Image (spheres, rainbow, N blue to C red):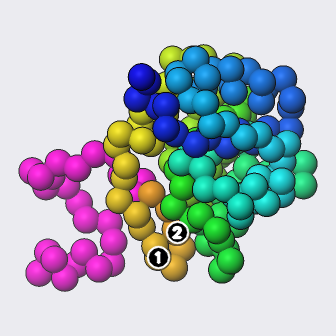
Amino acid sequence: MSQFSRVLALVVDDNHYMRVIVSTMLRSMGIVHIREASDGAEALEIVRDWRPDVIILDLVMETIDGIEFTRLLRTGVDSPHPYVPIIMMTGHTDRSHVIAARDAGVNEFVAKPLTARALIDRMKSVIENERAWVKSAGYTGPDRRRRRTADYKGPFRRSSDKAIMD
């Protein structure tokens, strides 16, 4: 039995063929509970009635794009599932898009054309290595720091860190 056999996955992309490709990759990993949506608005409706364990969505879509969907899900007052891991996929991998996705609260980012290995790696990351949750005035989502080192002696960057240094 696959380590992913009990995972509920939602695939969101405005391109039907991309949804088929991603769903096929997920099935090859052993995921059998897969739902699909053609845009962020449809995905929000699905999430209201069904609680996926992971959402894999495209960045660029009509109606509600991937970044706006992530913001609505993470910070919306009526959000049905704000803590669900989100993997964003896109062909727009320039720095500004990656930063915008990260700042919206995306857990992982994967470039198109998508490979099975890249998707497996991202799935393992969000399921096996769950990051702490951060909720502040300017950000809600998974902790953006990927690793912690106990012996870190570098500069503190937050104003609240000054109290620690004194």
Looking at the image, residue 75 sits to the left or right of residue 127; the answer is: right
Q: Where is residue 143 drawn, in percent x and y?
A: 40, 58
Distance CA(mark 2)–CA(mark 1)? 5 Å
Tell me, yes or no, whether the two marked residues, 2 and 1, touch with CB atoms within 8 Å: yes
Looking at the image, residue 151 sits to the left or right of residue 5; the answer is: left
Closest to the observer: 120 or 49? 49
Q: Where is residue 57 drawn, in percent x and y?
A: 69, 42
Q: Using the image, determine if residue 89 lies above or below residue 52.
A: above
Residue annotated with mark 2: 139
Q: Using the image, determine if residue 12 lies above or below residue 151.
A: above
Q: Which residues are magenta?
A: 143-166
Q: Secondary structure at mark 2?
A: loop
Closest to the observer: 166 or 52? 52
Q: Residue at x 45, y 57 (%)?
A: 142
Residue 95 painted magenta? no
Residue annotated with mark 1: 136
Q: Using the image, determine if residue 99 lies above or below residue 109.
A: below
Q: Amino acid at mark 2?
A: Tyr
Query: In the picture, residue 63 is in which quadrant?
Result: bottom right
Q: Residue at x 19, y 55 (%)?
A: 154
Closest to the observer: 117 or 24? 24
Residue 159 painted magenta? yes
Outermost residue toward the front in this view: 1
Q: Residue at x 79, y 60 (%)?
A: 45
